[in-house]
Image (spheres, helix red, strand yellow):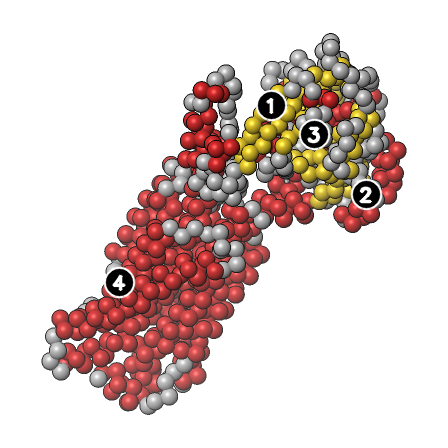
Amino acid sequence: MAGIAAGIPGSRLQRWLTSATYGLTGGDPRLRLEFAHGDGAGGVEIITGRAPTGIAEVAVPEAVAQRLGRRVGEEIVPATLVPGRPAVPALRLVGIYRADPDDLVMRDVLTGGGIRESDYITVGPLLVAGRDHPTLAAGASGTWWITPPSQTRDLLGPVTAALASLRGDPALAGFSVHTHLIESLQAADEQERATAAVVVGPGMLLGMVALVAVALVGLLLGEVHRHGDRLLISRGASRAQVLALVLLGMLVLVPVVIGAALLAPVLADLLPGGGDARIFATTWGVAVLTAVFGAIASTTASLSGVRDLGGDRLGLAGPVLSVALAALAWWRLRTAPEPGPLTTLAPALLALGAGAVGVVLVLALAGLTGRLPGGFATTWGAWSARRPSPVIVTMRLLTVLTAAVLALTLTQLATAGSTARERAIAEVPAPTSVDVALTGPERTSELLSHLPSSTAVWRGEFTLGAGTRGAVIAVDDAAVASTPLVGPDPDPTWPQAADALGRSGPGAPPAVLTRSLADLVGVAVGGSTQLTVGSTQVPLRVVGITDRVPGQGGETYAVLTDLTAFRAAMSGVDISPRQIWTDAPRSTAAALDRGDLRISTQQEAFDRAHAQPASAALRGVLLLGLGTTLTACVLAALACAVGARRARRRDHAVLAALGAPPGLVRRGVGRSELLHVLLCVVVGTGAGTLLAFAVAGAWTVTPTVLPTPVLPVGMLGLGAAGLTALVWLAALPGLRAHDASPSHRLREGAS
């Protein structure tokens, strides 16, 4: 066995002895106590007391302690069920434990929390000290567990080989060999692929924005070299020679960008949290191809300085192609949102298509502003929009894309925060939840008296027909229970339902049903229904119907009722409160803890949900993309303003020669630029908001639950205003009029 375990690097070999041949003296005749001892066992967290060390000591799972009604220090007296088996003396309960959810062995050992019901009720394992314990002396069965390390990658192959070796070993003929690990590893691989697609998607969007910025750099270089290239041609150089110079510059640039691309993954591995990152050959390949493609895009754009385009006219080929690719991406997301190359690239293609349409729309709207009252500013803005240069068009595209990325990032962050909050409230239904299952009634009453705005809660399960199950939540104070509702926008019928629950008089227990349960049983407010709780038929008066009830968690069907009335209807059954919901902080509850309480808060649950690796990675990529895009846009705005100033100097010279005051020109150009930037930001914000709904299915780490995007209207407004101010202020210094004389500028422009 050890040799087979060695085939899985880092695996742990455990041997468990278990026996379930004893009952409980004075307990349910169907009850069976399962005693166990594990050699090398781990994954056990003692939450109250300590681990057993003596022959008369035992530790039990948390749920078993609740089922048996035992606390630390009390006795458990096993009852001999098999004739001839030795009697076992009373065992003192010295510890209550729970399993580590990441430990695969304990997760299987504690199936059902340690309680398994069929013809008999088997509870355990009750941990004892030593394999020679009297409870394991006869009739015990042994189980070997081979547990691979949780942090080891690529386990599927070794585990499959080990399983085949065990099943084919003649020495194990007649023994049962089974594992759920293969299915878990396959599911983990699928989750890894989905997470990679989620993270790579924003990376592709960032890459697309970067390529637009690189193309803009190429256009600016073309503008800078335009006059020099024309001078070379006027001195006898051919266009082929000038083109060769441009291509030679690209050849010099390519090794530099390849070196930067090869260095980038290494630097990423040095970042905080990047030590566990894997760098594949494809990582290097993608980085090098992206760098080379960027260099080619920059060089191709700079060729505008060599070619004579016959004027600064905007072609339609680029926008039409972008829209066609965006339509293909939209179709892909709508029909097949599973991870794949096209699905991963789809958000970037959608953003590019939206940006192209946005630029055309911005230029059209800017051209119409000349009809508005505003004097020189609107006239200049409309005139410049009708004859934009490629540099200006690309800069407008980058501004639209930056606004779209900003809106998309803010919406995604708000959606992720809302989803994490919903999960937290589903897990912990009150600001602070205190588990009192291990305490007595007097202790519960004491806690209620010291915790403000608190209510006692009992939670169980009901059955309805064949296979239909749901949650029963009984609260002592409906007014307090109404505060921890799931979601920021509760069903408007809930306050009336909670009020009716609190004012109900004698009769059947009042109940608030979820809408799904009310539709299932076909009952309305004022009607009655009947549910089975355990083996008891409980009649209920329906006083309210709402979308969700506090404490529902992940259940589809749930009912909220009054604890006092429900306890009366369940006469003969222990309906002791198991939780206390309160809005007191954790510190207040912790001050009352004597080692018998489990305290959890919504904030802790929110932090856990928010810190999941896939969610954290998605947030990091989005924020990295936003920061990079903002930086590129601001720097490009400054560079393009300087380029536009050079391109329009003859226009400024004509205005000055006609007697236009420099201050009027400066203010008019600045205001027209502000108008254009504002139009770009507004259009881009709208495009980014629509894009957030389009990528909701592709950028989620829980594909089975598609979140509804949450629009942070206030943050979107502040972000749009801030982006407008940044881009405009960055461009403003480059929009100043030249100080040289008009004749000098006209001669320079004609040279």
Mark toward the viewer: 2 or 3: 3
Mark toward the viewer: 2 or 1: 1
Residue 216 position (above or below residue 436): below
Q: Are marks 4 and 1 in contact (CB under 8 Å)?
A: no
Residue 444 position (above or below residue 281): above
Q: What element carries label 3?
A: loop
Q: Distance between the residues labelled 2 and 1?
A: 39 Å
Crowd rating for badge 2 (residues with CA inside 10 Å; few <14, some 14–19, many 20+): some
Q: Earlier in the sequence, mark 2 or mark 1?
A: 1
Crowd rating for badge 3 (residues with CA inside 10 Å; few <14, some 14–19, many 20+): some
Q: Which quadrant holds residue 463? A: top right
Q: Where is residue 122 in the image (x, y as percent from the top left)?
A: 68, 20
Give the labeled residue for mark 1: 142
Give the labeled residue for mark 4: 296
Label annotation for residue 593 = 2
**Kind of residue at disc 3:** Gly
